[in-house]
Amino acid sequence: MSMAEEELHELSPEELEALRAVFFKEISAGPTEELQLVVHPHLEKLMNENPDIMACFLVDSAGMPVDHVTREEKSIFTEEFLVVVSANIWGLFAASERESIGLNLGHVRQVIARTSEGFLCITKCGESHALAAIARPRARLGVVLRDLGVYSDLIAKKISEISQ
C-alpha cells in the first residue's frame, strides 16, 4: 500500500466525503444558486410565451446543466438525465462549431436538429453557455428561433452581470 493510500484510509468517511465535495466543486463548471435564481424566470417566460416550446435548457461550456424548464412532469427529469441531456446539447453545439470553422464558414450561432418527435434548437448564449429548446413537430420554427435569440441575448447579459 502506498503512502497516499494509507493516508486516505486514515480519513473518516465524513472527511473523505468533504474532500470529494471540494474536489468536484473545484472541477465542475456547474451553476451557482444565484445564476439559477436569475435565469429561471427567463426560461419560464420563454416557454410560456411560445406554446411550441416543450422544454428549455441552459447548459454551460462543460456540458453541465445550469437550469431547465419543461411542460412535462418534473419527475422524469432526474439529475442524471439532465446531465446526459446537457452534455449532448453542448456536444452537438461544439461539434457543429468545430465543423463550421473547419469549413471556413465562421462561428455557429444556432443549431437545428429535426427529428420525428420535433425539433432541438440550440443557440449560443454568451461565450460559455448554450440555450436549447425542444419544440413540437409542427412548431413555427421561425418564431421559436426568434424567441431563442431574444432570450439568449437577455440571459447572456444577466450571466455577464453576475460574473463581474
Image (cartoon, rainbow, N blue to C red):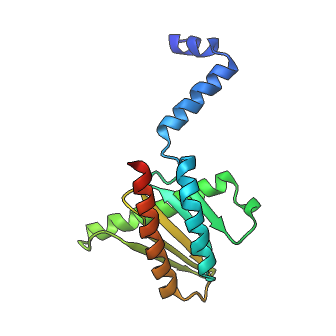
Choose top left, top right, bottom left or bottom right for residue 72: bottom right
Compared to residue 151, the image places residue 30 above or below, namely above
Q: Can residue 9 be seen? A: yes
* Residue 94 location (% of width, % of height): 40, 62
Whether residue 107 sits left or right of residue 119 in the image: it is left
Q: What's the residue at 40%, 64% (across, down)? A: 95
Q: Please name whichever residue, 78 or 100, is drawn nearer the observer in this view of the structure.
A: 78
In the image, 93 versus 132, the foreground residue is 132
Q: How many marks?
A: 0
Residue 122 versus residue 15 in the image, above or below: below
- The residue located at (57%, 54%) in the rendering is 36
Task: Tell me residue 150's x, y (percent).
Answer: 45, 75
Q: Residue at x 59, y 32 (%)?
A: 21
Question: Is 153 situated left or right of 56 in this image?
Answer: left
Residue 7 image position (x, y, % from top left):
56, 12
From the viewer's perspective, tell me whether residue 146 is left or right of residue 43: left
Q: Nearer the viewer, residue 27 or 37?
A: 37
Examine the rendered structure and indicate whether residue 95 appears above or below residue 136: above
Quadrant location of residue 65?
Answer: bottom right
Q: Which quarter of the rendering shows the N terminus?
A: top right
Residue 92 in view (yes/no)? no
The residue at the point 70 percent across, 55 percent down is: 78
Of all residues shown, which one is farthest toward the left?
Answer: 104
User: x, y (%) of residue 70?
Assistant: 66, 68
